[in-house]
Image (cartoon, rainbow, N blue to C red):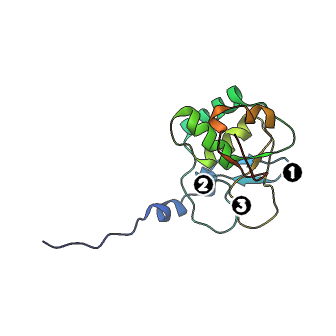
Amino acid sequence: MLHRPPQKSTRNQSYNRRPLADYPVVTLSDGSTYHVDEMGLIAGRRPLEPPPPAVDVLACMSWLEQRVSPRNTPSVCTYGVKHAASRWLGRYLTNGAMIVAADRAGFSQDTGRSGGYILNTVLGVSLPSYRRLPEVSGIECLATGQVMG
């Protein structure tokens, strides 16, 4: 029996040809705009992933609106927030879906740093409302370096 060598995935290559106009745009609190894919902000040089699925964006919006209170000053990293929402919903959600959902739901966002390779944003979420959630226990709050719970 002949064994074929494993073929390299062409997943990212096919999405690299997708026009940037196919990706959602978010506006951060400083007025800067970014396109977003499943991984997060499209900034710097990296392969593009597919746009966040609309069903995931809606699920993230639901979690944000039901579980936390907005705050003007960004304080919690989207990467940790998407893990908390995933626990609560019982399914995987992408970082990009959380970023787009926060934008659509009116939460303030910032990159938390300038320049470089940026994927995440820091969300304007009330820390007391966030910390009280059972789904947050043990998740690192990357914006402050604290572990919740």
Q: Which mark is residue 39?
A: 2
Q: Looking at the image, which residue is at 66% across and 49% down? A: 79
Q: Which mark is residue 86?
A: none
Q: Which mark is residue 30?
A: 1
Is 22 in front, or is 67? Answer: 67
Separation of residues labelled 3 and 1 (CA atoms): 15 Å
Residue 55: percent from the left, percent from the top?
Answer: 54, 36
Q: Is residue 59 above or below residue 8?
A: above
Secondary structure of the residue carrying numbered label 3: loop
Amino acid of disc 2: Met
Q: Looking at the image, which residue is at 57% across and 65% down? A: 47
Q: Which mark is residue 118?
A: 3
Residue 118 visible, this angle? yes
Horizontal side, residue 129 vs residue 140: left or right? right
Q: Looking at the image, which residue is at 63% across and 48% down? A: 96
Amino acid of disc 1: Asp
Q: Give the farthest residue toward the top.
A: 66
Q: Looking at the image, which residue is at 67% across and 58% down? A: 42
